[in-house]
Image (tube, grey):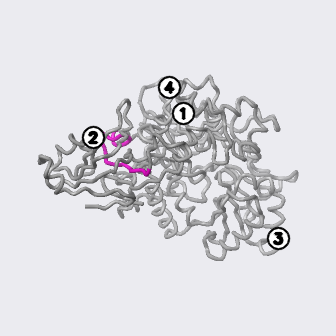
Amino acid sequence: MLNFKSGILALSISALLTSTAWAKNGIDSIYLNGKIYTAKDNVPLQQAIAISSDGKIVSVGSNTEIKKIADSDTKVYDLGNKILMPGLIDSHIHALATGVEMVLATLDDEGEIDIKAVEKQLRQAQQDGTGMAGDVLILNGLSSEYWKLTDQLSEVFNQNEWKNLPIALIGSDHHTAWANQALLKKAGVNSNFVKSLSAENIQNITHNKKFEPTGFLVDSGWDIVSEKIPPLSHDLMYKGSKEAVSYYNSLGLTAWLDIAANASPLQGIFNIKNTENTLGMIPMYKELSEKGKLSARVSGLHVINSKSTPKVFDTLDGINSKYKNINNFNLIGVKVFADGVLEYPAQSAALLGQYSNTKKSGNLLFDPQIFKTVVDEADRRNMLVHIHAIGDKAVRESLNAFEYARSKRQSHIPHSITHLQLVDPSDYSRFKQNNIIASMQLAWAYEDGLNKELVKPYISETTYKGMYPAHSLLKNGAIIAGASDAPVSTANPFIAMATAITRIGEDGGYLNTNEAIDRDSVFKAYTINAAKALSLDQQIGTLEAGKKADMILVDRDIFTVSPEKLAETKVLWTMFDGKKVYQQ
């Protein structure tokens, strides 16, 4: 019998035997005296749960009901009146890449913007090897605020000790980066190359009037350079991948949608060339599974080029056939970028209106008519489509494509749009109408320094207040699935939950509190709704008979604590397939 920390004591089976008539039903374990949140509609908190030897839920109910179905070999545990709930699920995450980033040199962007601090960290990363990819020195995690200082970056990292060493400074948003001249030279990015680019791609490599690149790169511009960075070692990739799974389990995550399973860390995913033949982290998932280290249910997506045609699915079918029947990992569809990011100076998110400083509308990355045929073909082949859409134009065109596919057939595939920073009010109801899931990173739904300085001055006040319209989408019948986009932001679901409820960040900045949502909605976003986004809602997402026993115990009453305390929630233990995979 297990002993749980934090006052969670195992009950004595012998004591219970004196007062209970046991049945012979082969129940492996029962958990009593809890507050069990099932995530089912209109079901109150339950007391107890029974788990079978094959890791499935047999029954949920009262102490009396659950005791009756146990037998003499059943293990009995006391939940100590604590909250038990389904394992949490993330519907948009760069999962293993997060772990690899954990073991790579990464700047803590919570501090002041300080180029000397960047230089100090680079020296350390060079010395201990955590920043080396072949002959390229890399530092992750730079805030977008650094891109206002590109002249200073050039003065430091194109001179003296750094002059001949290729250096990449990668933005925490993973859409932007800065490369010194040594790395640009290695990548073959010079004035002649820049001149040769299309109008769409030339704007993603900042250059002077002579077309000489200055180092700042956005989306496809970063892809061009990152292609020339040597791959990371297998040992580092595996170590980071294994640590990622353990880390997510400690946060209560037992399933996720890896929206770029075919992308490797440091590899760009906006590539102007085809990305469809890449494997990225897919072999890592296979290795983790084979070694029994994948204690999570993972639905994986291929990132495909935004300019792809329906023929892309022939290539993907070939890859999927080689990576099928992997325990706990399944490739289920594709992820496509409709646009980039909203923040200055990138401003690559596609708007219905214009940015006030440039009078431009950003970049819609696909041709709307061709993209409709891509979505239709994916839907015909029972493949899920998940679209990155930040700007309101990107959201609208994504909905148009889904609407086209739905007009052909009602496949009920849980297609989704993610981010949804800007959504035009006329499009709110179209999510329900077309059965499209809204995968939202609500940890971002407050006013921080980046929003205040790099977004607010460049769009209208009305548009700004409408960012991340969670309440409006719910009111119009949309299904919201919880998501993090880690490592771009925290993978901790409870921080996102608290922000979704208050629309207030840790620093007190708030963003249109009318778009806040209630606790039950946000808890369902990270359980049953996210399970739907992974096409796994028949297996997980609620605690009910027949589903997998993926569940977590938390250290506080998440229904009554303040939002501030909700954000500080700790997971006491995490179970996957009825077995403990994490304990505090």
Badge 3 or badge 1: first in the primary sequence: 3
Q: Amino acid at mark 4?
A: Gly
Q: Amino acid at mark 2?
A: Val
Mark 4 — residue?
477
Q: Residues within 10 Å of mark 3 (few under 14, many from 20)?
A: some
Residue 145, horizontal then vertical, whole percent: 75, 52
Q: Residues within 10 Å of mark 2 (few under 14, many from 20)?
A: many
Q: Amino acid at mark 3?
A: Gln
543 relative to 476, above or below: below
Badge 4 or badge 2: first in the primary sequence: 2
Mark 3 — residue?
159
Residues at badges 4 and 1 in contact (C-beta under 8 Å)? Answer: no
The chief SS type of the magenta part is loop
CA–CA distance in space, label 3 to label 2: 66 Å
Residue 179, horizontal then vertical, whole percent: 73, 61
Residue range of the region highlighted in magenta in the rendering: 538-555
Mark 1 — residue?
517
Q: Amino acid at mark 1?
A: Ile
CA–CA distance in space, label 4 to label 2: 29 Å
Residue 356, horizontal then vertical, whole percent: 81, 35
Badge 3 or badge 2: first in the primary sequence: 2
Mark 2 — residue?
60
| Residue at (63% x, 59% y) in the render | 227
The local secondary structure at tag 1 comes to: loop
512 relative to 160, above or below: above
